[in-house]
């Protein structure tokens, strides 16, 4: 069965370019050119993945993302012209699974879509699979993370995978390469910014519910949970 992708982009040229490239890879594509149109579609239908621009007429991409997250864990890749670290962190905090900075190469879009779909397919939780480390608990069945019985908001797939790896082996130091390849399911090419953004994102979410530091940076090596 073909996987269906919703492309939300108000620039008709970019939207059509993405649709053409994805259909060549045998994806079924649907297009939305405004936030209002996208909101209507995600409320009525289910998709394998959503490509979402933020600067949209009607309602914003951030509002569309909020609607998506209120009803599903559908992988969302944000297309953005924002390139500052804080802006990228905000995108992930708000529930996106990944982001691609404009202008982009189609090959990169296809690669990132492939990663998200692999995670979506392989990440189906095993029943009663709960991982605990001190007062941190990960529930793979419901895809939730709690600290002191308080639910952490809007945990993405990569954030969950990072915490899962660290929580299964507390106090063990994992290199950035090991964490990246586990969470993204792709070869580590030496770029650390994406992983660092996700670690920062996790820390901010934890800090909202407790003052305890769970993830320790081991300088020159990577990270560990303690």
Image (cartoon, rainbow, N blue to C red):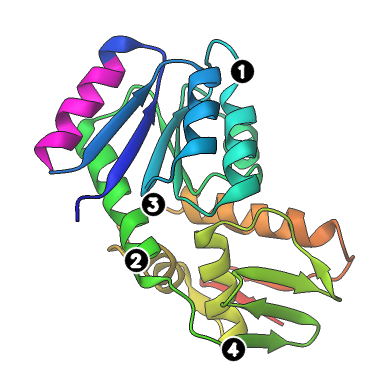
Quarter of the image with the C terminus is bottom right
Residue 193 seen in the figure: yes
Mark 4: few/some/many CA within 10 Å (<14, 14-19, 20+): few
Residue situated furthest left in the rendering? 24
Residue situated furthest front in the rendering? 44
Mark 2: few/some/many CA within 10 Å (<14, 14-19, 20+): few
Residue displayed at 62% across by 29% down: 62
- Observer-nearest residue: 104 or 117? 117
Q: Quadrant of residue 138?
A: bottom right
Label 2: element kind: helix
Q: Is residue 15 above or below residue 25?
A: above
Residue highlighted by disc 4: 128
Residue highlighted by disc 3: 191
Between disc 3 and disc 4, whose residue precedes? 4
Tag on residue 121?
2
Left or right of 113, for residue 99: right
- Disc 1, disc 4: CB below 8 Å? no
Q: Quadrant of residue 85?
A: top right
Image location of residue 78, percent across then percent down: 47, 35
Image location of residue 76, percent across then percent down: 46, 43
Q: Mark 2 and mark 1: span between their CA atoms?
A: 30 Å
Label 4: element kind: loop
Residue displayed at 21% across by 21% down: 17
Q: Mark 1 and mark 3: span between their CA atoms?
A: 34 Å
Between disc 1 and disc 4, whose residue precedes? 1
- Observer-nearest residue: 185 or 212? 185
Which residues are drawn in magenta?
A: 14-25
Image location of residue 26, percent across then percent down: 13, 43
């Amino acid at each position: 069965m073909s996987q269906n992708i919703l492309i939300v982009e108000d620039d008709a040229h970019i939207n059509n370019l993405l649709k053409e490239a994805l259909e060549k890879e045998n994806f079924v594509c649907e297009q939305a050119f405004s936030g209002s149109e996208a909101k209507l579609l995600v409320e009525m239908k289910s998709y394998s993945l959503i490509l979402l621009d933020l600067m949209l007429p009607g309602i914003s991409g951030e509002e569309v993302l909020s609607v998506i997250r209120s009803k599903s864990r559908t992988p969302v890749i944000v297309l953005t012209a924002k390139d500052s670290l804080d802006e990228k962190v905000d995108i992930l905090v708000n529930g996106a699974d990944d982001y691609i900075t404009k202008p982009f190469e189609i090959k990169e879009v296809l690669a990132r879509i492939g990663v998200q779909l692999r995670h979506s397919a392989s990440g189906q939780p095993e029943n009663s699979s709960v991982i605990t480390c001190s007062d941190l608990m990960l529930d793979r069945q419901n895809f939730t993370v709690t600290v002191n019985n308080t639910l952490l908001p809007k945990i993405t797939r990569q954030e969950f995978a990072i915490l899962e790896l660290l929580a299964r082996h507390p106090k063990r130091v994992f290199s950035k390469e090991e964490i990246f390849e586990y969470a993204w399911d792709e070869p580590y090419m030496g770029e650390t910014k994406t992983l660092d953004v996700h670690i920062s994102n996790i820390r901010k979410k934890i800090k909202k519910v407790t003052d305890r530091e769970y993830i320790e940076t081991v300088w020159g090596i990577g990270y560990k949970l303690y």
